[in-house]
Amino acid sequence: MNIKLRFMRGSRVILSALSFKSALDHKLLEVLEKVQLLKRGSITDLAVILNTSISVAWKRLELLRKLKVAYTVLVNYSKIGLYQIAFFFDRHVPFKLLHIPYIRFYTLSLSPPGTFVVFSAPRHLWKYFTEMIIDRVGREPSKIWLVKRFLPYKHKIMKWVDSQNYTIFIDWNVLIKEILSRERKTVAWDLPDNLNDVKFDTIDLLIIRELQRDPFASFQEVTANATEIARKLKLGINVTYKKVLKHFRRDIIGHELIFNIVPSHVPLDYSNTVYSFISIHPKNGWSLAIYEVLSSHPFFVGCRVDCLGRVTGSLVLPQGEISNFNLFLENLRDLGVIEDWEVFVLDRVNRRAFTLPYDMYSPITGWRLPQLKSGSK
């Protein structure tokens, strides 16, 4: 492709992003990046990949915790019988109308005006779930994104964070070159809705719940917390340390119910930034390449590919880079990589996020739909 790229100011530092400037150095950046190679927070394993002692690895991790860095595990939701559905309604929908089991995210869209909400939904019941939401709101959504296949991602922290200037930067031309350098692949994004490949049970869900809260929790802590939750929810199961260890090795790791550890919170200076949801429609074969490149940059959070091959995700971008982002997308279109895109500027201040409704799962019935009255009546 001999198409000349339009000039973009992508190499300049664009965000004074890290509020823990006095403590930041390349060793802590290395921890932030390499911890993503782990499926569970083992200090021993972390020390091995950092090529240091257990005590040093522990001290660096504790320093990051004191600096308010938090971690979670990236869950392969389709393997536990769930899809993700995002809706955009072109009007204001009150939160109380959408605050039902399976809600994961809610906020208002500032441009275009409306409401943006994300749910998890049982794989085999997602169509009924969608009808239930439409009936409750009283109108069809303007946009729907259904994610069936979930993929791992790892942020390249050391590549895009400058520990000398305490900034995150981006080079749009580098991102374009990385996308073009990757092989085009045809991927089946629209999976069958049956549960033939789903192999998990209640203990697996309790373990995932605890690892989402703290991937570095010991198995003793996981057992104690899971036992308490099972008692409160009256699940009727006996959670023991031996069972937790067995289920983690056989199911969580063996059946790939989780991908890896990822940072869930890094203290950033969000002033003069724009928080958006993006939806990019690639041409055939480019979805995976775009996903892999964008999800590796810290500005792109929670990237997904929906069942139509559209690459979606949240984007935290400095206001001065909005024009560059548009040029980036226009370049990809001119290069024949994408067809079109949509950007929804969201309300970051009043957004709400939620964990999985583990009480909606039963060992007998599996994931079940909530009993709701129509909100439009």
Image: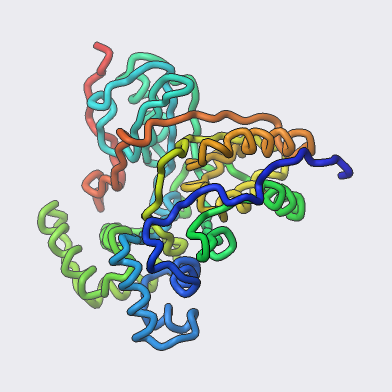
Q: Is residue 376 left or right of residue 184?
A: left
Where residue 1 appears, x then y in whole percent? 87, 44
Q: Is residue 341 left or right of residue 22?
A: right
User: Picture quarter containing residue 351?
Assistant: top left
User: Picture quarter containing residue 203?
Assistant: bottom left
Q: Which residue is found at the position 29% from the left and 47% from the top?
A: 355
Query: 359 above or below 48?
Result: above
Query: 305 above or below 153?
Result: above
Residue at the extreme right of the image, as rendered: 2
198 vs 152, nearest the viewer: 152
Where residue 171 appears, x then y in whole percent? 65, 50
Q: Which residue is found at the position 50% from the left and 56% from the top?
A: 167
Residue at the extreme bottom of the image, as rendered: 53
On-image quarter of the C terminus: top left
Q: Is residue 198 visible?
A: no
Q: Is residue 211 visible?
A: yes
Q: Which residue is found at the position 26% from the left and 74% from the top?
A: 219
Q: Which residue is found at the position 41% from the left and 26% from the top?
A: 109
Where residue 286 appears, x then y in whole percent? 70, 44
64 vs 362, nearest the viewer: 64
